[in-house]
Image (cartoon, helix red, strand yellow):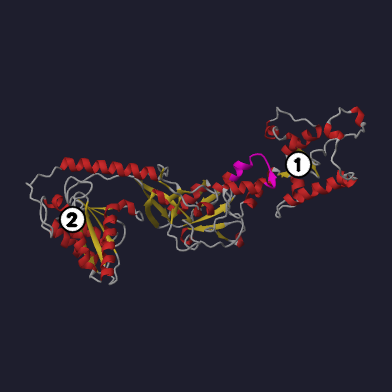
Amino acid sequence: MMVRMLDYEFKVEYRPGKTNISDYTSRHPLPRETCTRRELGTTKDVKQYVNFVVASDIPRAISKEDLVKATENDEELKRLITCIRERKIDHRNQDMKAYFNIYDELAVADGLVLRGERIIVPREFRETMVKIAHEGHQGIVRTKQLLRAHVWFPGIDKMVEKHVGNCLACQATIPCHTREPLQMSELPTGPWKKISVDFAGPFPNKDMALVFWDQYSRYPVVEFVTSTSAEAVIPQLTRVFTTYGIPEEVKTDNGPPFNGSKFAKYAQEQGFRHRKVTPGWAEANGDVERVIQTVKKSARVAKIKGKAFKQEIQRTVGNYRATPHPVTRQSPDKLKFGREIRRKLPERVVPQEEQRHELIRERDQRKKKQMKAYADERRRISQSSIKIGDCVLLKQNRGNTLTPPYDPRPYAVVGIKGSMITVKRGKEVKSRNSSHCKVLKYAGKEEHDYLDWDKEQGRRCSVQASKFSKFTPKAPGDIYSSIYYARSDSYLGSYVSRKAALLELLTKKGSFRSHQI
């Protein structure tokens, strides 16, 4: 109240109580001591109070003198001070529009404009104030709360949202829970046309289980290999293909040996198409992954019972083949061979029936439709808006508590195939599912640790793609500016935007020099 009364000149006039309208409370006051002059407040008390408000609200990095000087040079605040002193505000002035609704809260003290107990920050220091409030990298809401508790200026919320949203460190540490809608594969035209292959293990003896899965009949095959090298895997593939035939398509992940030249040569020799799923995305090969869980469970049961895990796994696989699948309602044995294979249990005495492929296909489509609807309903689905040329952050494995969910060193998008995004950084090329990628909101003047600071050249810095892996800051301070001059070693180049300069760095071989303008 004292601050709001500073701009008013008033005269205190005594009026006898008998001249006032009589009421009960004025005639029956509560007993108390007489108010002293100190309780009423003096001009000295008011000045001390204003100085306290101003001093307590100024961040340590900015002095009161700096704010006063900036206020004197701020045309908008100078007009506002004039309006406050003249006790009227020009509603036709667009600069004053932001102050219409809070005009009664405004006051001027010691060269500063106050809104209640908060300082109105001049335009020169608004961005600095936002950076100071975000030093602890709190979220948007808490950064707003911290800033608004001490200062105020028009557009404070939007500036905080933009700054925090463009913070590279925050983008790398905040996980993204949205996923693309589930994409279902079509049923092959017949058994053993398309198969999936993956590894389970390692087991206690260091062996790996090579698991095959027929996408049509749901027929599993398990073979054991000593390692994941091409020399160990290819003979087992040949053995299985000799027994069941060579499929038209083999779907695998991008791990060894499927990502090597020897396997590519083997696929060409055998005449099957090799389809690689998105790396690091187990859902893309989910059918065989589910069988792998069954294989692992069987191995654990064998250990508990003290049995040989390899024989126990084969028993589990045999029973799996003879069990009617919930989607096809036929056993994998019958769909694979056209008849039931004799097991320990007695066979059914029924006439042989022809396979009803259309019925199986209809059941498969119905089940996949239900699966997609269920998955999309439970997950936060969102169609990916990633485009070729975007800068993205890539999800990384959590090594420890301090490891952020995303690699803060950005990649450039160079290819899109369905939900698989191919990114590049220097000579490093990776393919991941779109849910593992986050579009980088460029951080403006945000400090980037992968730029090397060259003290001899002042603000000049050299950028090299090979130094992305180090990711250690060489000097503090802001490195980016609004525009950079990017040029090659031959000194031929052009002015490009900040984002284009970073994309050029990520996708082009060699080193670049970047100079601030």
Closer to the camera in the image, 308 or 154: 308
Q: Position of residue 507 (x, y in %)?
A: 43, 52
Height in image: 355 above or below 407? above
Closer to the camera in the image, 180 or 452: 180
For the residue marked with disc 2, what is the amino acid?
A: Arg
Asked whether residue 32 is drawn in magenta, I would say no
Height in image: 230 above or below 196? below
> Which residue does the numbered mark 2 point to in the structure image?
321
For the residue marked with disc 1, what is the amino acid?
A: Val
> Which residue does the numbered mark 1 point to in the structure image?
113
Q: Position of residue 158 (x, y in %)?
A: 60, 41
3D distance between C-alphas at marks 1 and 2: 80 Å
In this picture, which residue range is highlighted in magenta?
A: 149-160
Asked whether residue 153 is drawn in magenta, I would say yes
Q: Position of residue 335 (x, y in %)?
A: 15, 49
Q: Residue at x 71, y 28 (%)?
A: 91
Q: Earlier in the sequence, mark 1 or mark 2?
A: 1
Q: Position of residue 61 (x, y in %)?
A: 70, 54
User: Which SS class for mark 1?
Assistant: strand
